[in-house]
Image (cartoon, rainbow, N blue to C red):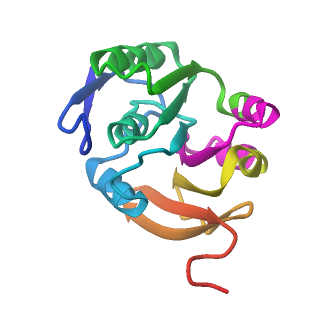
């Protein structure tokens, strides 16, 4: 069993356990710290969607920091069971919705339901073209002023109408925060 530590908020220092699974790479502490500095430490009132939940590091971190709703999507049964176990351990079931689904199918169902999110965590397995398949669905599932956090095997300047406004690199991982429209400060 692998572990990841929540770095901020209500569940700070709590350790989550998750199994080995193909393509599963938890977002490192340093990168999560940067992400939540970009987003703000308090996510109170925000709704978050983690389409490739994996270890749960991003979704549990968002819930720990006060997000009012966090939906975590995972397809692998063993990984899903670990997410559910960690949610019970943290007594977080009320704030979290854990869904077993394919990311594209789930995003499509959200579009038809009219649900929108303030923050989208998009950290798919590499070299499987997930981001390209999800891009056409993003504007229908994101709040007007929402942000998308993307981890990828290469730097991304755009994702449809979404533009990178902050970015970094940690080893082989490129990470970026995206907003709809023009980068901050651009006219």
Name the residue located 24 percent from the left edge and 34 percent from the top edge: 11
Q: Does the stretch in magenta take in 44? A: no
Q: Is residue 53 above or below residue 28?
A: above
Residue 125 appearing in the image: no
Residue 131 lies, in percent from the top left, at 66, 48
Residue 85 appearing in the image: yes
Residue 93 lies, in percent from the top left, at 42, 19
Name the residue located 33 percent from the left edge and 54 percent from the top edge: 41
* Highlighted magenta segment, given as a residue range: 107-134
Q: Is residue 157 above or below residue 35?
A: below
Residue 45 lies, in percent from the top left, at 48, 44
Name the residue at the left extreme: 13
**142 left or right of 64 in image:** right
Name the residue at the front extreme: 45
For the C terminus, give its image quadrant: bottom right
Name the residue located 24 percent from the left edge and 44 percent from the top edge: 7
Name the residue located 46 percent from the left edge and 59 percent from the top edge: 174
Q: Nearer the viewer, residue 18 or 13?
A: 13
**38 left or right of 156 in image:** left
Residue 107 figure quarter: top right
**165 left or right of 102 in image:** left
């Amino acid at each position: 069993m692998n572990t990841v530590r929540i770095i901020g908020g209500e569940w700070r220092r709590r350790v989550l356990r998750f199994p080995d699974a193909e393509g599963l790479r938890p977002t490192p502490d340093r990168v999560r710290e940067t992400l939540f500095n970009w987003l703000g430490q308090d996510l109170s009132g925000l709704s978050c969607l983690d389409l490739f939940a994996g270890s749960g590091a991003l979704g549990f971190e968002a819930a720990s920091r006060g997000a009012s709703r966090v939906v975590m999507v995972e397809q692998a049964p063993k990984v899903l069971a670990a997410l559910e176990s960690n949610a019970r351990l943290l007594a977080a079931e009320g704030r979290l919705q854990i869904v077993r689904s394919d990311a594209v199918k789930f995003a499509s169902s959200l579009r038809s339901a009219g649900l929108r999110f303030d923050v989208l965590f998009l950290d798919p397995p590499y070299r499987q073209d997930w981001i390209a398949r999800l891009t056409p669905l993003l504007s229908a599932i994101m709040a007007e002023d929402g942000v998308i956090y993307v981890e990828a095997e290469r730097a991304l300047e755009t994702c449809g109408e979404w533009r990178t406004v902050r970015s970094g690199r940690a080893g082989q991982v490129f990470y970026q925060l995206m907003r709809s429209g023009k980068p901050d400060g651009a006219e």
